[in-house]
Amino acid sequence: TQLLEQSPQFLSIQEGENLTVYCNSSSVFSSLQWYRQEPGEGPVLLVTVVTGGEVKKLKRLTFQFGDARKDSSLHITAAQPGDTGLYLCAGASPGNTGKLIFGQGTTLQVKP
Amino acid sequence: NAGVTQTPKFQVLKTGQSMTLQCAQDMNHEYMSWYRQDPGMGLRLIHYSVGAGITDQGEVPNGYNVSRSTTEDFPLRLLSAAPSQTSVYFCASSRTTAANEQFFGPGTRLTVL
């Protein structure tokens, strides 16, 4: 069974601080996706990383895929209240196009 | 395009009752899936389908059935509801595989008494 361990589960910070969310597994994934979810809505894709060592930037968000494609991180610089939400990582298995496995999620609260 | 639609939005069942959660997409996506979301557990995959006529089990399939007779529709059936099935259910679709961007519906909040 593939597992994705996401940490921390909860994060409450002040506006302007930096933070990092981690997504770790003992399994290799063909790609890893990061989603953000608002209360009462479905998750929405932020980014997909595919190549080991890949780094993608989306404004103040930086995503990295580990060299071995077993882990990933999301770094937010100068967090803003609008960044508040649930962040989820999800991994797709190599050679299996069917299963997308999610981590437990990180609930981020950014206080003004 | 409506994207992914789910009905109903809310449902209350008694233990032992059966029901079907509806999911439809109008994007001509091949891949569709069902997840349940419980506090602190992220999204857990129930069943998925890589095309019409093809379905397979996910991480937590027990107590649920699915079928995929058309590309557009992917209903989820609860055969005999149990309190442990109280959850928020999300349907998702993507172009071809789990590795593509997933488009999620708005969710169905189910309570089993």
Image: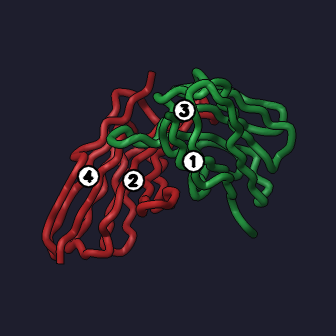
**CA gap, disc 1 to disc 2?**
29 Å
Front-lying residue, B66 or A105: B66
Kind of residue at disc 4? Val
**Quarter holding residue A77:** bottom left
Q: Are marks 2 and 4 on the same chain?
A: yes
Q: Are marks 3 and 2 on the same chain?
A: yes
Residue at which label 4 appears: A21
Q: Which mark is residue A54?
A: 2
* Same chain check for tags 3 and 4: yes
Image coordinates for residue A15, horizontal then vertical, percent: 17, 75
- Callout 1 and callout 2 share a chain: no
Q: Secondary structure at mark 4?
A: strand
**Amino acid residing under circle 3:** Pro
| Colour in which the image shows chain B | green
Identify residue type, mark 1. Answer: Phe
Q: Which residue is mark 1?
A: B90
In terms of secondary structure, where does tag 3 sit? loop
Indicate the position of residue B95 as horizontal and vertical percent values. Answer: 70, 52
Asked whether A31 or A6 is in front, the reply is A6
Which residue does the image show at 45% across and 44% down from the upper left?
A: A90
Q: Amino acid at mark 2?
A: Glu
Lateral position of residue A84 relative to residue B112, left or right: left
Is disc 3 in contact with disc 1, using a CB cutoff of under 8 Å?
no
- Chain letter, red: A
Quick check: do tags 3 and 1 share a chain? Answer: no
Label 1 neighbour load within 10 Å: few <14, some 14-19, many 20+: many
Residue A94's disc number: 3
